[in-house]
Amino acid sequence: MKAQVFRGVNQLSYEEIPVPTLEPDEVLVQVRVVGLCQSDIKKIRYPLYEPPRIFGHETAGTIAAVGSQVQGWQVGQRVAVMHHIPCMRCAYCLNDNFSMCSVYKNISTTAGFNPSGGGFAEYVKVPGHIVQNGGLIAIPDNISFEEASFVEPTNCCLKAVKKAQIAPGQTVLVTGAGPIGLMFVMLVKYFGAKAIATDLLPSRIDKALNVGAEAAFDARDPDISAKIHALTDGLGVDVTLLAVPSEKAFFQALDCTRKGGKILFFAEFPDELEIPINPNILYRREIDLMGSYSSSYRLQNLSADIVFNRRIDVQALISDRYPLKDLSAAVDQAIAPTPETYKILIYP
């Protein structure tokens, strides 16, 4: 089969490699579409992982083979694939911190080499514990593979929305109107709250309004704090979701979030970045700082329901489609997006 193999920083090699062989409890999925995620780009561009590996994890496809012990799944079924499933027994899992579980972090779907998602290949193998514990999600007949590939990123965003306890009637600032920020806007609206978005690109500001934001501003606007306070009866927003790794965005969030409000870090910042902050700002204003990483096992069914019942319009986020052989070009576009670049999908 063909696969894009990570051979080193910024080195993707389009290669012919063996189709993964199955253990009795495993399933082989033919990848029909896989989303290009910012975390994939980070893993390709920086020396975070030893090569060789095959990345890609927002995967949807067709079951091509099942192990002899697999029950409930058949060749030909259309599935969305969750690449991580926690052990459900460790201290982290027992506290619902599933993304901290070592099984969750280290045992993944794979197309070969060290398991790393494997979606950037023609076939991906799903380990037994993922098969047995809800990591395959059947795609309804009326839902495309493209739509189904959004189940995993929807879960990640939904986890952040739930963690920040966003509730009907609240106002939420979303910093960054890329594909993740736009998904946040949609989810905030779906749960009955009002979204205000910021971005640097006029096209993304317009896009945020088109997908449901109550207001959207240029992040460089020197009057943005005053404008947001004017929209919130002088209080500021209840929650800010940081969807861009920007120090300026964080301090803007501090200015725009009300006393007793929450700021949630969703985007991953560079490791070398340190943000100085006077702790009295948090103490006196009772601002909660929190982070949300990856997906939540408990939200898989809700994430699938939101996508499969089209409660948000994930198709509105798709801007570009590339064949697998052109993954490097897709990564280049994601790094230097055009004004109309949003979600990029890859087709093995």
Image: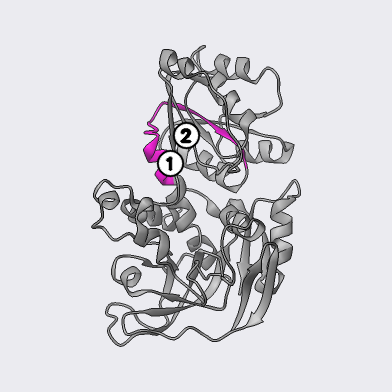
Q: What is the quadrant of the N terminus in the image?
A: bottom right
Q: Residues within 10 Å of mark 1 (few under 14, many from 20)?
A: many
Residue found 54% across the figure and 64% down from its top: 146
What are the residue bounds of the magenta stretch?
Answer: 158-177
Left or right of 112? Residue 170 is left
Give the residue number, with chain letter if any, for mark 2: 264
In the rendered image, the vertical position of residue 268 relative to residue 134, given as above or below: above
3D distance between C-alphas at marks 1 and 2 = 8 Å
Residues 313 and 227: in front is 227
Residues 335 and 234: in front is 335
In the rendered image, the vertical position of residue 151 relative to residue 186, given as above or below: below
Residues 343 and 294: in front is 294
Give the residue number, with chain letter if any, for mark 1: 160
Q: Position of residue 175 (x, y in %)?
A: 59, 34
Residues 244 and 268: in front is 268
Mark 2 and mark 1 in contact (Cβ < 8 Å)? Answer: yes
